[in-house]
Image (tube, grey):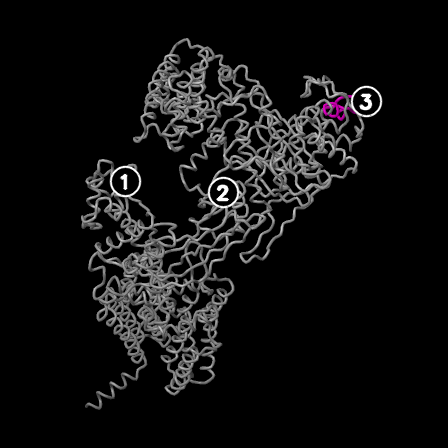
């Protein structure tokens, strides 16, 4: 029986599908046993103690390449900085331990003179009470964070309404950071801020919390020594970009800043990879243009973190590669000296042209009225009128504000009355003051989007009438409403389609209610308060001290006790270069200079004044100031400003004349002072005729008549018919030969030149519509000095890898040669030599140089309401030229003021003393060399 | 067409009292568990799975009613088709992670030929053996059989996809065994393959081996030395163990929402290859056992249907499907519990993946049809 059962069982088992079934059950049993082990036996362990292993990738920053001058001096470089960070948030687990650690850390930092990032919007006012230091939106966000909510809408009403004291109490309570009362309130706040930063990274713990940036070595040592008391704190190294002596070089170097989304997108479109948001890239200048070379390559580090993000293990997968270095042809020391010289000269020009009581109707000499110069401080934000409403404003500031508010009321009221009148007076009948106010109102409406100025232009008769002051602004606005140019939705709230008169009333009321807040309106109000002597200019000078622009000094005391008033104060401050031309942003406020090696085409100096400090751009206040400063410090005058070359152009005309067969070097033309073969007639600068002269003398004395005649002759065809285009065509041909039709080749953004296309006779002396940059004029000068080599000029010498191996060596190419007879060249150069050696006014300036220096001055008028430009270009030697220099003073009052600057630039290049043994960097303005010879000048000392 | 006419003819012949779709319900429960678990990872994937499931239900119903003899009649066509699509994927398929295993169907997702090929492979082999059932133990037939099995395996190995080819191998072997391979031949085959396998396992760990690709070597080494590979190739399985283990007895779903289900965030492939780990985290030991139970239930239904099948081909099909289901499930769970080296196979009915879902619902559909035509009971 058992045998039967067994055999039938055996048979059963022998069945194949049974075998298979048993096999399957066996397989799954293994799984169930394993599951039992993992889930039941060790389940709790898995739950509590073991941690996930998650892979994260971190970038290792690469050291950006450096920029050197021709002698290996650094202009821009990356410096390692040590940041104090909390990298292991989990190192301590109780609130008390963490607070202690943070407190220790704060003390260590303070002991070494460093602070920490303070990010929470709470502060203690001078009554010892807590208040919110930021706006409501920031506070709501903060509350959402500390209550661990995802959306600010999730805040309860109670939470949203909590005031600063209540928020603070919550933060230090056991519900959040549990900060004990043994600390002072201020200490509690500081601990809370750092705890908050740690709290915000609690789910991303592989990211560290930066507590303090760029600490010094002793702090680093202190932190490492005390690491037992500071668990979780470590030092992280990063790079900070340094720009030594930045002001001199920022136009060349540019600066680096955070990459924007738009820039990232455009890089991706161009196939440039490797950038992520949070990277810094070059934004201007060489930093931008050579971004790909300088940037290097970031490395990657792989981390394994647990599910809270704490790092379990890390290794460097790919090392970072440093960027390439760039060596320039620029000479650092030369650049600095030239820059200081230019600043001192501009200040000197301003001083020379300062006057008291200038009549604007009779100001052909374009003098600066000292009072306008004082007001320029307000206009250019040096004295910031917005600070008058600060709670910490001084009494004087408050007085100014009060006066303005009172006056603004009056002005607005009067304007309202004017505009609301059925019969409105034309603007020009209102008087200068109110005409200006009306203009400001117009600008205000356009910039606020109420008036859409793209809808009309000067061809509109009504607009034109208003521009000429013939009708009232009110009339124009009424007209504008009827034409639909006014966005009525901004002013008349309830009616979508108001009657014109209703809309007009609404508009006037809108103006009345809002104009007082307009910045430009306020500035104008102050202008007239000062003009009408309600406020005093001397007080404006005092405001410089109240606002911290200057530390209180003797000058301040003199102002305070009446020993000095505004005119001598301003004179002395400008003279001492404490108030600098860029702070005033008058017409005369800028300068540029280019120096090139004649034999190679390498640019050894490229200077632009005013300039800015690239290292300070992180500072939001500084950046704001740069953006509103009317002297535009960030514009590179040497490459981006084109202007009429004036008489510096005459060598082109001479070359065209000699080489084109119109004159020989002996041909004489008699200067008749007034050239009347064109209409209107053109006149020579000298009322006394230069007599009969040849081209050499014509260059030497810069005789306009000679060149008018030459230009005229070029414009005649074989039958003697005059054609502007013919003359212009010849001049263009030669200008192009000298490279004036293209940018100079300098590796920065450069404005395109414009060869004149108007009036051949005037173009011959460098007027017409000729317009070139300092660099372009310098290139053409280099071509003269080298007798024909037109270079593609270069400020970059070579690019090397981080080890110094040369990757690219840049030799300026001669892109064209001006082929002319040697005799022609010698003629022109002789003319230039005589400018410096024989001209009565100038020769004393150059005599002390003892070289056969060649130059050509230029005085170019571009705007009859502004002072003329001053230029001079030339080279150090007729026989063996090495350096070609071009100096430009836009609105510099004519070439007399640039001669000694040019002489000094050449002197610096050849290592000779400066004119009158001037010492730079003494903080003194350098007056024009002939200042004391001229009668009208007096100083205000 | 011929197929449609025979289809409608057969419908009249079916005795619907024998229409046993119990395996279908078990499969459905598994799929629902799957969808619920997939939602942890991604709700959009879960939605796609639901749509896929609906399609599969229709496919299932269709195949339960299609007479499997139709399929066996065209078995060479099916086999040809399998070879064609396996070749095509090598030439035209999408390269992903160094493997060409899929075709993309635009927004519909991907289709994996080696997956869907399995059921047609089973049907083909069943028919093949059936035709030679008297003489299956002849060397010639065995030889041809082995050749026919090896060709698709080689194609799959070239993708490369070692794990799926092992499933094909297992299917081939089991079906031959079920089909009446003599014990002697069984012994010979085991005598060859088992020592070979052991040799290969030893060989792959040798530093200068040339047979296996680097990632395959890495997998074996990881399996034998997990501590050394904690931060690289073992990390995924380790995380899977964490997820499963932390589910403990009844899983995090039952202890309420305060427990974060972390596994789906930290575990890659948590919607297909490692879904069992998430099931373990969410539903605990009990949940896992339920899943195992459901799968076993379907396997046994297949085996019972096989026993009662009308003919050998039906029996072989049912056995083949049951084995495929059991073997693949075992591999998937084994990987998720670190019993086996890491290899990517979906968990039938549960994992996200249209092809896999379709394959299995079609498979049990055919099995149900076999059952519909059974002889006894």
Q: Are marks 3 and 2 in contact (CB under 8 Å)?
A: no
Q: Which mark is residue A139?
A: 1
- Residue A927: % across, % down: 56, 28
Say whether residue A538 is magenta.
no
The chain ID associated with circle 3 is: A
The image shows a total of numbered marks equal to 3
Q: Which mark is residue A246?
A: 2
Q: Are marks 3 and 1 in contact (CB under 8 Å)?
A: no
**Separation of disc 2 and disc 1 at Cα?**
38 Å
> Considering depth in this image, is B366 or A235 the residue closer to the camera?
A235
The chain ID associated with circle 1 is: A
The quarter of the picture where residue B320 lies is bottom left
The chain ID associated with circle 2 is: A
Which residue ends up furthest to the top in the rendered image? A423
- Residue B90: % across, % down: 50, 66
Say whether residue A720 is magenta.
yes
- Residue A758: % across, % down: 67, 25
Position above or below: A41 against A270: below
Q: Which residue is mark 3?
A: A719
Q: Earlier in the sequence, mark 3 or mark 1?
A: 1
Within 10 Å of the Cα at label 2, are there few (<14), some (14-19), or many (20+) other Cα atoms?
A: many
The reply to the same-chain question for discs 3 and 2 is yes
Query: For the residue labelled by badge 1, is the local secondary structure a helix, a strand or a loop?
Result: helix
Q: Residue at x 54, y 19 (%)?
A: A459
- Horizontally, residue A492 falls left or right of residue A9, namely right
> Considering depth in this image, is A846 or A138 the residue closer to the camera?
A846
Magenta stretch? A707-723
> Considering depth in this image, is B145 or A402 the residue closer to the camera?
A402
Q: Are marks 2 and 1 in contact (CB under 8 Å)?
A: no
């Amino acid at each position: 029986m058992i045998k039967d059962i067994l055999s039938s069982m055996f048979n059963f088992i022998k069945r194949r599908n049974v075998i298979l079934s048993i096999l399957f059950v066996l397989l799954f049993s293994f799984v169930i046993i394993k599951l039992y082990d993992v889930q039941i036996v060790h389940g709790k362990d898995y739950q509590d103690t073991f941690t996930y292993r998650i892979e994260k990738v971190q970038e290792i920053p690469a050291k950006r390449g450096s920029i050197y001058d021709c002698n290996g001096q650094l202009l821009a470089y990356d410096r390692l900085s040590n940041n104090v960070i909390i990298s292991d948030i989990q190192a301590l687990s109780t609130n008390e331990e963490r607070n202690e650690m943070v407190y220790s850390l704060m003390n260590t930092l303070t002991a070494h003179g460093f602070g920490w990032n303070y990010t929470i919007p709470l502060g203690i006012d001078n009554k010892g009470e807590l208040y919110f230091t930021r706006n409501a939106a920031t506070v709501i966000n903060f509350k959402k964070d500390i209550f661990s909510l995802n959306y600010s809408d999730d805040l309860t009403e109670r939470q949203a309404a909590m005031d600063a004291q209540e928020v603070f109490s919550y933060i230090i309570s056991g519900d959040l950071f549990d900060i004990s009362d043994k600390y002072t309130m201020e200490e509690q706040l500081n601990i809370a801020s750092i705890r908050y930063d740690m709290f915000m990274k609690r789910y991303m713990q592989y990211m560290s919390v930066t507590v303090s940036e760029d600490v010094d070595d002793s702090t680093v040592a202190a932190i490492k020594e005390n690491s037992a008391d500071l668990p979780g704190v470590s030092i992280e190294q990063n790079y900070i970009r340094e720009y030594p002596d930045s002001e001199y070089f920022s136009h060349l170097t540019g600066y680096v800043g955070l990459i924007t989304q738009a820039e990232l997108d455009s890089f991706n479109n161009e196939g440039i990879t490797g950038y992520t948001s949070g990277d810094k890239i070059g934004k201007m200048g060489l930093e931008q243009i050579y971004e790909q070379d300088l940037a290097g390559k970031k490395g990657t580090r792989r981390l394994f973190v647990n599910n809270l993000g704490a790092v379990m293990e890390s290794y460097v997968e790919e090392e970072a590669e440093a960027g390439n270095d760039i060596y320039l042809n620029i000479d650092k020391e030369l650049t600095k000296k030239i820059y200081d010289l230019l600043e001192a000269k501009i200040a000197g020009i301003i001083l020379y042209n300062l006057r008291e009581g200038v009549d604007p109707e009779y100001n052909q000499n374009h003098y600066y009225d000292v009072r306008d110069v004082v007001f320029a401080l307000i206009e250019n934000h040096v004295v910031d009128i917005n600070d008058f409403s600060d709670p910490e404003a001084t009494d004087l500031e408050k007085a100014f504000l009060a006066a303005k508010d009172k006056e603004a009321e009056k002005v607005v009221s009067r304007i309202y009355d004017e505009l609301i009148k059925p019969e409105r007076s034309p603007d020009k009948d209102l008087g200068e003051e109110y005409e200006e106010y009306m203009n400001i109102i117009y600008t205000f409406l356009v910039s606020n989007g109420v008036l859409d100025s793209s809808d009309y232009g000067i061809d509109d008769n009504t607009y034109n009438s208003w521009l000429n002051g013939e009708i009232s602004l009110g009339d124009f606005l009424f007209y504008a409403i009827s034409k639909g140019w006014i966005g009525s939705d901004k002013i008349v709230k309830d009616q979508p389609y108001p009657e014109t008169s209703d809309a007009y009333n609404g508009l006037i009321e809108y103006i009345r209610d809002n104009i007082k807040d307009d910045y430009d309106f306020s500035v104008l109000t102050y202008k007239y308060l000062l003009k009408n002597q309600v406020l005093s200019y001397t007080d404006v000078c005092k405001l410089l001290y109240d606002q911290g622009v200057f530390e209180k000094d003797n000058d301040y005391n003199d102002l305070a006790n009446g020993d000095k008033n505004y005119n001598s104060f301003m004179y002395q401050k400008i003279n001492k270069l404490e108030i600098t031309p860029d702070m005033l942003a008058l017409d005369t406020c800028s300068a540029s200079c280019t120096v090139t090696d004649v034999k190679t085409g390498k640019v050894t100096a490229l200077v632009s004044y005013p300039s800015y400090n690239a290292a300070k751009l992180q500072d939001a206040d500084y950046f704001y100031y740069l953006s509103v400063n009317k002297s535009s410090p960030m514009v590179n005058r040497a490459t981006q400003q084109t202007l009429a070359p004036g008489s510096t152009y005459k060598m082109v005309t001479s070359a065209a004349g000699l080489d084109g067969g119109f004159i020989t070097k002996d041909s004489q033309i008699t200067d008749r002072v007034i050239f009347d073969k064109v209409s209107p007639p053109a006149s020579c600068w000298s009322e006394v005729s230069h007599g009969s002269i040849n081209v050499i003398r014509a260059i030497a004395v810069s005789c306009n008549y000679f060149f008018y005649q030459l230009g005229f002759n070029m414009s005649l065809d074989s039958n003697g018919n005059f054609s502007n285009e013919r003359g212009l065509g010849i001049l263009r041909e030669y200008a192009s030969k000298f490279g004036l039709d293209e940018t100079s080749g300098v590796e920065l953004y450069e404005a395109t030149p414009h060869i004149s296309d108007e009036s051949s006779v005037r173009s011959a002396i460098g007027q017409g519509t000729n317009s070139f940059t300092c660099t372009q004029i310098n290139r053409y000068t280099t071509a003269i000095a080298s007798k024909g080599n037109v270079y593609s000029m270069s400020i970059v010498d070579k690019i090397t890898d981080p080890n110094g191996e040369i990757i690219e060596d840049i030799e300026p190419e001669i892109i064209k040669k001006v082929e002319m007879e040697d005799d022609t060249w010698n003629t022109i150069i002789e003319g230039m030599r005589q400018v410096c050696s024989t001209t009565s006014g100038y020769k004393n300036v150059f005599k002390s140089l003892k070289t056969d220096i060649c130059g050509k001055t230029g005085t170019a008028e571009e705007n009859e309401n502004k002072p003329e430009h001053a230029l001079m270009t030339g080279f150090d030697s007729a026989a063996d030229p090495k350096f070609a220099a071009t100096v430009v003073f836009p609105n510099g009052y004519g070439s007399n003021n640039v001669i000694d600057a040019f002489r000094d630039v050449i002197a610096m290049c050849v290592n000779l003393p400066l004119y009158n043994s001037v010492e730079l960097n003494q903080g003194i303005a350098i007056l024009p060399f002939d200042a004391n010879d001229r009668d009208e000048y007096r100083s205000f000392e | 067409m011929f197929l449609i006419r025979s289809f409608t003819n057969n419908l009249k012949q079916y005795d619907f009292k024998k229409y046993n779709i119990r395996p279908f319900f078990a499969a459905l429960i598994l799929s629902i568990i799957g969808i619920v678990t997939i939602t942890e990872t991604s709700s959009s994937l879960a939605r796609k799975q639901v749509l896929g499931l609906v399609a599969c239900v229709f496919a299932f119903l269709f195949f339960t009613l299609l007479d499997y003899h139709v399929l066996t009649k065209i078995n060479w066509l099916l086999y040809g088709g399998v070879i064609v699509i396996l070749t095509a994927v090598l030439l035209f398929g999408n390269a992903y992670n160094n493997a060409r295993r899929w075709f993309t169907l635009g927004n519909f997702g991907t289709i994996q030929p080696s997956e869907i090929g399995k059921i047609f492979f089973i049907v083909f082999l069943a028919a093949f053996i059936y035709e030679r059932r008297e003489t299956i133990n002849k060397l010639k037939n065995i030889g041809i059989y082995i050749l026919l099995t090896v060709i698709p395996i080689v194609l799959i190995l070239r993708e490369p996809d070692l794990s799926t080819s092992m499933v094909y191998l297992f299917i081939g072997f089991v079906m031959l065994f079920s089909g009446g391979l003599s014990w002697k031949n069984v012994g010979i085959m085991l005598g060859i393959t088992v020592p070979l396998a052991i040799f290969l396992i030893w060989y792959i760990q040798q530093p200068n081996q040339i047979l296996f690709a680097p990632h395959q070597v890495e997998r074996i080494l990881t399996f034998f030395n997990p501590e050394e590979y904690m931060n690289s190739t073992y990390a995924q399985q380790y995380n899977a163990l964490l997820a499963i283990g932390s589910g403990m007895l009844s899983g995090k779903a039952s202890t309420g929402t305060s427990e974060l289900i972390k596994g789906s965030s930290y575990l890659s492939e948590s919607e297909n290859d490692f879904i069992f780990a998430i099931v373990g985290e969410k539903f605990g030991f009990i949940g896992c056992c339920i899943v195992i139970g459901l799968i076993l239930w379907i396997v046994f239904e297949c085996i019972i249907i096989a026993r009662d099948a009308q003919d050998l081909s039906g029996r072989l099909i049912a056995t083949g499907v049951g084995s495929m289901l059991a073997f693949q499930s075992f591999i998937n769970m084994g990987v998720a519990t670190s019993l086996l080296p890491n290899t990517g196979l979906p968990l039938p009915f549960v994992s996200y993946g249209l092809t896999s879902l379709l394959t299995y619902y079609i498979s049990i559909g055919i099995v149900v049809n076999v059952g519909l035509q059974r002889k006894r009971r």
